[in-house]
């Protein structure tokens, strides 16, 4: 799940300026290696594509079917172990981080439907996974986005 949120949040706005952790080749290689990849050009291109498609799917701008091309050539292989049945994902090496992000999205959609969403702050591009009991989290960070939004609403009410 960490790779999914990290991927979705790899293009934030910082002081009104977009920062793309996968845009710069050196920074992208570092990001990919921190998430189990090798940082190759093909891997970074696939990660950028996966990020853009996943962001659109989570926002409801695209159908989950748009994720299909990212899973081409991916297979699950059953393996019987002393602990029971285990499924191993077989994928081309450069596609592993992107495939893991898509599979994490599918797992969240299955186990925690509606909990992965964009931050409610219109000027923020980050996403959050709501783990609260009431499923009412709205901001990626209460200290940053939540506080700004509450201050803005207070200002509008008192104006």
Image (tube, grey):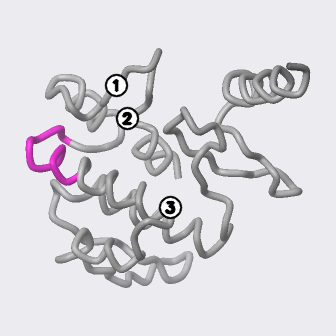
CA separation in Å, label 1 and label 3: 20 Å
Identify the secondary structure beneath mark 3: helix
Identify the secondary structure beneath mark 1: loop
Q: Compared with residue 27, is residue 73 higher up or lower down, i.e. above or below? A: below
* Label 1 close to label 2 by CB (< 8 Å): yes
Instruction: Check the picture and name the quadrant holding the C terminus.
Output: top right
Q: Residue furthest front?
A: 159
Magenta residues span 38-46
Q: Quadrant of residue 22?
A: top left
Closer to us: 33 or 15: 15
Residue tagged 1: 19
CA separation in Å, label 2 and label 3: 15 Å
Q: Earlier in the sequence, mark 2 or mark 3?
A: 2
Residue tagged 2: 11
- Main SS class of the magenta portion in the image: helix
Does 125 sit left or right of 18 as displayed?
A: right
- State the residue at coordinates (52%, 39%): 126
CA separation in Å, label 1 and label 2: 5 Å
- State the residue at coordinates (48%, 62%): 104
- State the residue at coordinates (64%, 50%): 129
Q: Compared with residue 48, is residue 111 higher up or lower down, i.e. above or below? A: below
- State the residue at coordinates (29%, 77%): 68
Residue tagged 3: 58
Q: Earlier in the sequence, mark 1 or mark 2?
A: 2
Q: Compared with residue 62, is residue 159 higher up or lower down, i.e. above or below? A: above
Identify the secondary structure beneath mark 2: loop
Disc assigned to residue 81:
none
* Label 2 close to label 3 by CB (< 8 Å): no
């Amino acid at each position: 799940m960490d790779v999914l949120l990290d991927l979705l949040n790899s293009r934030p706005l910082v002081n009104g300026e977009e920062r793309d952790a996968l845009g710069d080749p050196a920074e992208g290689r570092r990001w990919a290696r921190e998430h189990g990849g090798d940082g190759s050009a093909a891997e970074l291109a696939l990660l950028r594509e996966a990020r853009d498609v996943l962001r659109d799917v989570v926002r409801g701008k695209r159908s989950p079917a748009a994720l299909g091309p990212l899973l081409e050539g991916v297979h699950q292989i059953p393996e019987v172990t002393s602990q029971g049945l285990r499924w191993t994902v077989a994928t081309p090496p450069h596609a592993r981080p992107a495939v893991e992000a898509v599979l994490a999205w599918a797992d969240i959609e299955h186990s925690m439907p509606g909990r992965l969403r964009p931050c409610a702050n219109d000027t923020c591009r980050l996403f959050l996974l709501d783990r609260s009991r009431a499923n009412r989290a709205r901001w990626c960070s209460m200290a940053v986005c939540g506080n700004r939004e509450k201050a803005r609403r207070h200002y509008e009410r008192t104006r």
